[in-house]
Amino acid sequence: MSLKRYETYKPSCAEWLGDVPSHWTVRRLGYYFAERREKVSDKVFQPLSVTKAGIVPQLETAAKTDDGDNRKRVCRGDFVINSRSDRKGSSGVSALDGSVSLINTVLAPEKEVLGAFVHHLLRSVDFQEEFYRYGKGIVADLWSTNYSEMKNISFPNPPLHEQAAIVAFIDREAAKIDALVEGQRRLIALLKEKRQAVISYAVTNGLDPNAPMKDSGVEWLGKVPAHWRVVPARRLIAAVEQGWSPECEAENAESGQWGVLKAGCVNWGVFRENENKALPKTLEAVASLEVKLGDVLVSRANGSPELVGSTAFVSKSRPLLMLSDKIFRVHTKSLCDSQYFVLLFNSVSIRSQILQTISGAEGLANNLPQASLKAFACVLPPIREQRAIVTSLNQTTPRIDSLVAEAESAIALLQERRAALISAAVTGKIDVRGLAPAAAEAA
């Protein structure tokens, strides 16, 4: 899409804004908004959550605050932003009356501005960067920005009818991009389902379509090759190690620095070495917990149930990364190929057992105990067939993984495009006045 610029511009005197259309007004944000500081109780005023999707009702399962006025009041039409930089992007105009935690800044409009325009402008990447630039604190990712600083940020204000045109343009174009993103996400889900189906078939049926079959004795497993065994996982496992989770820095470990792996390092059966946090220099690393090539890692705990038990083979890794207590390192016995073990634990047969275990373990939600892991029923071919299955799947699954990576890259580009389009519109870098839907599509 190629969109025209305004005919004339003027300096905004704000670096983050640059030049703005000549007829726009630029004043300090504090001219248009006042900080709402009234403290209330979430037992009287509906508790709201400030997320990257906007302001939403707090989940019923979320803990309530103690008695007393320990929250900030929010009125419909207020703009709320999380002042901590580690929550960058968590903000929006509220469509609800309620209350939010004290870490948030609540802005009540005092001058006539269009709420939807404010929502897009103050959530734009350019504004968010400017807002958090004023943060103060000890750790960079935990800086907080106070209203006393925020109120001095320059606020570009087009005429109201132009704000409405900008909002209509953003909503229309963002909806198109969101539809494309959703299409890519559906594709990724289908590809991951196909990947798991291919793996599951190979580890439960083998590579020989003519092999004699027998009843496995396990209802959900059905028939398996007649010469295979069905054994508890403990028969395949020589030892299980669990790591250590000290209080770490917010950023990734740098080269030559020790890091501690996060639970997400083995999501979807792929090892991601960048999912780590730097170990503080005041703490001594446990060298015996360093991840090594050939390791089998299993996610013990995760906020998402579908990721608990995700298993990965470490085929490459930077040095100086330690296991956390949310990760198991499994050592397999000689009768089980370690890469076959990883494939088996990412198959439907094991995943179904994992989900049953964590859903039925009261007080252990989203946690996989060692005892349960060792009790899972596993299909065990002869070691020669295990290695043949590994070789076959190592030729098949990378093609699927490549398609997933392409779809994920497409999503990233679309989201960048969406953010850039919004920033350009709300800061006046493109002129969308009088741009009808048909014209926008043709542009």
Image (tube, grey):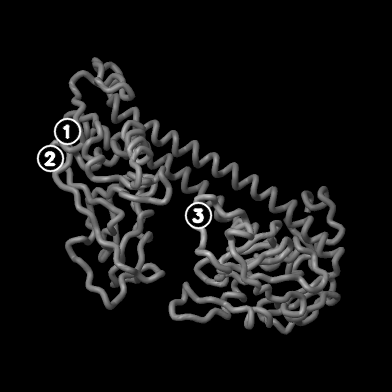
Q: Name the residue under label 2.
A: 334
- Tag 3: amino acid: Ala
Taking the image as shown, residue 307 lies to the left or right of residue 383, namely right
Q: Answer yes or no: is residue 9 visible.
A: yes
Q: Mark 3 points at which residue?
A: 62
Image quadrant occupied by the C terminus: bottom right
Q: Answer yes or no: is residue 199 visible.
A: no
Against 426, residue 63 (above or below) is: above
Q: Kindly give the residue lying farthest to the front in the view shown.
A: 67
C-alpha distance separating marks 2 and 1 = 9 Å
The mark that comes first in sequence, 1 or 3, is 3
Q: Name the residue under label 1.
A: 383
Against 128, residue 222 (above or below) is: above
Name the front one of labels 2 and 3: 3
C-alpha distance separating marks 2 and 3 = 47 Å
Name the front one of labels 2 and 1: 2
Q: Is mark 2 on a helix, strand or loop?
A: loop
The mark that comes first in sequence, 2 or 1, is 2
Q: Which of 54 and 214 is in front in this view?
A: 54
* Mark 2: few/some/many CA within 10 Å (<14, 14-19, 20+): few
- Tag 1: amino acid: Ile
The mark that comes first in sequence, 2 or 3, is 3
Q: What element carries label 3?
A: loop
| Image position, residue 178 (x, y; %) | 64, 49
Residue at x 72% of width, y 70% of height: 108
**Circles 2 and 1: CB atoms closer than 8 Å:** yes
Taking the image as shown, residue 220 lies to the left or right of residue 164, namely left
| Image position, residue 208 (x, y; %) | 27, 22
